[in-house]
Amino acid sequence: MLKNHKAKNTLSIVSGSIINKYRLRGETSKILSYRMHRKFINNSQYERKKRNHAVIQKLSKSVQIFLERDENSKMCPGKKDYITKNKVKKQKRIMLDSLCNLHKKYLATEFAFQVSRTTFCRFRPFWVVAPKQSDRETCACSKHSNVEMICASLYNAKTIPTKKPDELLKAMICDEKGIGCMLRNCPRCKERTIPVKSEVNENLNKIITYAVWESKAEKREIKGEFKDVRKTVKIQKNDIVKNILKILQVQFTPYMKHVFFMRHQQKELQRLKQFLQPNELLLQIDFSENYVAKYESEIQSMHFGASKKQISLHTGVYYYRTESDALVKSQSFCSVSDNLDHQSHAIWAHLHTILLELANRFPNITQVHFLSDGPTSQYKNRNNCFLMCKKIPQYFKNIESMSWNYSESGHGKGPMDGVGGSLKRKADRLVLQGQDIICAGDFVHKLKESSVKIWEVLEEEIKDAKLEIPNNISQVPNIMSMHQVTWSKKFADKLFLRKLSCFACKFDEPCIHYSLKPSVVLIAAKTKNFKKQKLQSVGGTSKQEQYISPNLTLASKNCSDMELSNVSNVSSFSLDEDEKNTIPKIKIISNILLQTFERNVKETKGLCYDCTFSLNIQNEGRKCFDCSRTYHLKCIVKHHFNKNSEIFLCPTCFRK
C-alpha cells in the first residue's frame, strides 16, 4: 500500500485526472506505455477490492429456487403468460405472498444465507412477479376461496383480528406441522375456536354480507326441452355476525385438513425431486387446455361458426439423475392428438412414446414415480391403476416398484402447465407469420424445432389402448381419499393405498404412517357369468326351446298377427341352432322396418362401438350391461340383437 503523501500524489498525476485535464494523455503514453503504466501501478502495491462473485451467485440461485417453489409462487399456464428480458423469455410465475412475508419465510427456512430484505428483493427473478388485476385466478381452490371470503367479511366487520386464514390457523393449533393438531385430534388444542376481538359482543347481531361459491341446479331450455343442469355461481349472502362465525367454525376443520394435505404433498414431492436417485424416474403430467386450430386468414362463417377444430395436448416434465450428475436434470415433453379423449386409456396412449424412449435411455431404472392431479375421469380411477400395473413392467424390464402420487384437490398446478402455454404461444406466433395449424400433425411439424419433445398420437392408437382395458376391473375402495398408490414386483397383483404420500416406508408393505383401510387391494379383472335364459322365438311358434340371450329375440314382447302384418318386406326368417353355448344364426332375407323398435328407447351419448359414429337423438342406442359400450339401434339389429330387452349384452360379452 502507498504509505506516504508523495507517492500518492505521484500516482494520481500519472494515472489520474490531472493528465486528462490538460489533455496530456497522448504525450504521457509515449513516455509511459500501457505496460509500464500497469507495472507502475502493480509496484505501488495498490490492491482493488474484489467482489466475491461465487457467494453472490450461490445467494442469487438460492433466492431463485426458493421463489420458484410451488408453495411460494404459481406457474401461469396461459400461452400469453410470459416475460422477456434481455432476449430471455420465461413463463411467468405469480407470487403467493408479499416480498416482505416471503423474505421472513426465507430467513426462517434457509439457514445458509442471512440477507437483508433489499438484497432479497434485488435477487428476485424477473419472471416471478407480484399479482396484478390481469392475473386473476381462474383455477382457484373452492375451499380456500370460501374461507378467505368469509374471513374478509368478518375482518371488515371488526370481528376477527386478521383476514388471513393462515394466521387464524396458527392461533388455533399448537404445531402447524403436527398431523394431530391439523386434523383436530390434539387434546391440547382441539377445543380451541376462532379468535375474536374483545369488543365484538356489541356487534354479534349485526347483519353483514359475505360471498361464497356454491353449486346449484337449475332448469335450462336446450333445443326446446327443459333439462336440469348444475352450475357454480358466486352468491352474496346476508346474515348476522354470530351465525357467520358458526359457519366459519364449521368450515375451518375441513379447511385445516385440506391445508395440511396440500402442504404435505408439496413438501414430500419437493423432497422426492431433491433426493432423486440414479435408478429412479419422476414424471409430472397433466392435460393442457385444448388448442384451437387456426388458419392464417379465416372467412366470417369459419371464425364465428362451430367449424373450429380443437387439438388435445398432454404435457409433462420428467426428472432424472445420472451417476455423474450432482444435480437433478429435467426434460419437458408434450404429446398432441386430434382425439379429444382424456380418459385413462388415452393417457397411456399419450405416454407410450416417452416411456419407450426413457426405457431405452435408462435401462437400469428400478423405480418410477408419477405425479398428477386427481380428476376421477383421468388419473384417479381403477382403470388407470390397472394400466399402471400392466404397462410399466412392459417398458422397464428391471422395474421393482413404482408409485402414483396425487396433489391435493385444487392445487395441481406445476411446471407442466407452463409447457402447454409455451407451445401454444409459439403456435400462435407461427400462425401470425402466415402458416396454418389445423390438425395435430401440423402442430407437431411446425414446432419440432422446440426444446420440448413433441410427438403426435394417432386416433387409432387411442382406440387400441381402450381395447386393453378389461370389462370388469376390481374396485379400489376409498380411492377419493387416496393421495398415493404403490406397486411392487414382489406382489404384482396388489396395490398399497395411502392417505398421503410417504417415501420413508417400503412400497411392498402397508405404510405405518398414512395407510388407508383397507391398505391392500387386489387389482385384477373379474369375470361375470350371465345365465342364458330360455326363451321362445317370435310369436311363440317355435317347437324347440332355444337357449338364447334376451338380446337375441327379435322383439321383447310377442308380436300379434296384426303387428307382424305391419312389418313390410319380410319374406321369411329361420333360426339355426347349434350347441347351447353358441349364438344362433338368425337369417333375415330382407330389411325390416324399425317402426316397432323406436318406442321407449332412452337417449345415449357417446360413440357407437360398432360403426364409431356419434349417438344422438336421431340415432339412439343401447349400452352393454357388462362392458358399458354403446351401440346404435341399427347396429344392434344388424347383429341380430333385440334392442327392447331389459338387459343388453354386446356380442363380445355374450360370447364369454
Image: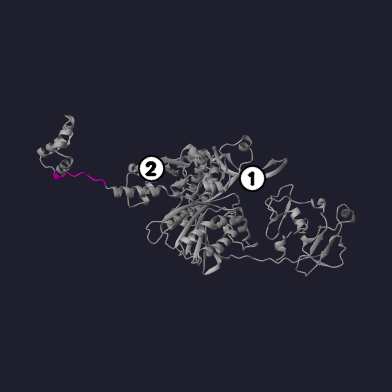
Note whether 306 is above or below 482 in the view shown.
above
Query: Residue 643, located in which quarter of the rendered image?
Result: bottom right
User: Quadrant of the image for the C terminus?
Assistant: bottom right
**Residue receiving disc 2:** 100
In this view of the protein, which residue sits in the foreground, 342 or 226?
342
**Residue receiving disc 1:** 230
Check the image and name the residue furthest to the top. Answer: 22
Query: Residue 628, located in which quarter of the rendered image?
Result: bottom right
Q: Provide residue 449's location: percent of width, then percent of height.
A: 47, 48
Q: Tell me where the magenta segment starts and ends, as one range.
A: 42-51
* Secondary structure of residue under mark 2: helix
- In the rendered image, residue 45 lying in the magenta stretch gets the answer yes
In this view of the protein, which residue sits in the foreground, 390 or 72?
390
Which numbered tag is attached to residue 373? none
Query: Tag 1: Cα neighbours inside 10 Å, few (<14), some, or many (≥20)?
Result: few
Note whether 231 is above or below 355 in the view shown.
above
| Rendering colour mode | one colour
Which of the two labelled residues, at mark 1 and mark 2, occupies the earlier sequence position?
2
Q: Provide residue 331's location: percent of width, then percent of height.
A: 45, 53
User: Quadrant of the image for the N terminus?
Assistant: top left
